[in-house]
Image (tube, grey):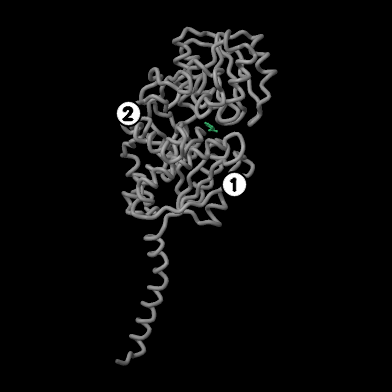
Amino acid sequence: MTLNRKSFVVAALAAAALVATAPQAFAQAGKIKVGLMLPYTGTFAALGNAIENGFRLYVTEQGGKLGGREIEFVKVDDESDPAKATDNVNKLIKRDNVDVLVGTVHSGVAMAMAKAAKDSGTMLIVPNAGADAVTGPFCASHIFRSSFSNWQPGYAMGEVVAKKGHKKVVTITWKYAAGDESVGGFKESFTKSGGQIVKELSLPFPGVEFQALLTEIASLKPDAVYTFFAGGGAVKFVKDYAAAGLKKSIPLYGAGFLTDGTLEAQGADADGLLTSLHYGDSLENAKDKSFRLAYAKAYKLQPDVYAVQGYDAAQMLGIGLAATKGDVKNKAAFAAALEKARIDSPRGAFTLGKNHNPVQDIYLRQVVGKENKVIGVASKNLSDPGRGCKM
Ligand code: BEZ
């Protein structure tokens, strides 16, 4: 058969179009590249590892695929350093061409990630950092959080401390978004209930020189202290508070990060502490039981709140990808699926608010031995106010 000139040109154009579209079609059916940006060094290293463990556990349970597509990981250690955050996230977006960003722990780093995700249109799931801005002014249809806002545990604890009859409270935390916002949530509900914050103490992140501040607390003699610390800093703070003799005289309350994933190292110095969080060690729901068994079997470790948040970040990615048949670029369908989902979490099922932050129970927990025992619900179905979010 011979081709005339016109049909030859048509055939050549069709062949060229096929070549041009083939790589895209292949990528759609191929692997999904997940960029894990987490701290693997520094005071939050254990938190980053637990998040990755939880995320991988869910993916493994699904046979390594979500929405029919195999999951491939690229990792960056963000060192919980906001100064390096923009460069780090751009490595994942521009160099590695990831389809989805998952990270991080530190609120300051997460804000840089949210900005880069917003500017580039890259899907982002935040598996810890509570920065209020991520689901506030930076909110977007392709940005989600599987954890909490800093405001949530603080707000819940303010009500608890007021109900206990404490009137004058000193707060102490690291001076950065997570500390400021956790104290902000506490202050909002505590003062609404008639309480007074007599002094707000802080030190730079990730400092652990607490001695002068503990001496100041002793001289101020408040009814109680509220605190936000996490990871290695939380271990040191709880030990120093007890060593200074304050544990016996001034009750210490905290956002639950104070005692989560830290009890082995804190030992008896943590005994009896009351904290507020969206997870605890004795929830006894079916999902939590199976999750804890699977996690312990896979990693020879007990899970903590960070592992749960990583697991749920993977569940959320799975829900979005199932709805879009693996097409991460179909952002509207991805968001619609998550906005109507009930996520079957070990913490208890939760939904996402309009700003894509979990609407969830905040538990009241007490340290008993090596457990954060759930002793009640500090705030039922608490949604973040999403101040400044326009979506
Ligand atoms: C934060 O920076 O948002 C954060 C870090 C550790 C635990 C909880 C919150």
Q: Is residue 357 left or right of residue 114?
A: left
Q: Quadrant of the N terminus?
A: bottom left
Q: Is residue 380 left or right of residue 245?
A: left
Identity of the amino acid at label 2? Asn
Residue at image position (35%, 47%) is: 62
179 is higher (above) or lower (below) than 250? below
67 is higher (above) or lower (below) than 193? below
> Horizontal and vertical percent for residue 32?
42, 55
Q: Quadrant of the C terminus?
A: top left
- Check mark 1 vs ligand 1: CB closer than 8 Å? yes or no: no
From the viewer's side, name the closer residue of 162 and 306.
306
Quote the CA–CA distance across marks 1 and 2: 40 Å
Residue at image position (54%, 18%) is: 268
Residue 86's label in the rendered image is 1
From the viewer's side, name the closer residue of 6 and 274.
274
Label 2 secondary element: loop
From the viewer's side, name the closer residue of 316 and 199.
316
Identity of the amino acid at label 1? Thr
From the viewer's side, name the closer residue of 195 and 52.
52
Q: Is residue 82 left or right of residue 24?
A: right
Crowding at dot 2, Cα within 10 Å, few <14 / some 14-19 / many 20+, comes out as few
Rendered image quadrant of residue 44: top right
> Horizontal and vertical percent for residue 82?
61, 40
Crowding at dot 1, Cα within 10 Å, few <14 / some 14-19 / many 20+, comes out as some
Residue 285's label in the rendered image is 2
> Horizontal and vertical percent for residue 337?
32, 44
Q: Nearer the viewer, mark 1 or mark 2?
A: 2
Whichever of labels 1 and 2 marks the residue nearer the N terminus, that label is 1
> Horizontal and vertical percent for residue 19?
41, 73
| Residue with the most extreme bottom position | 2
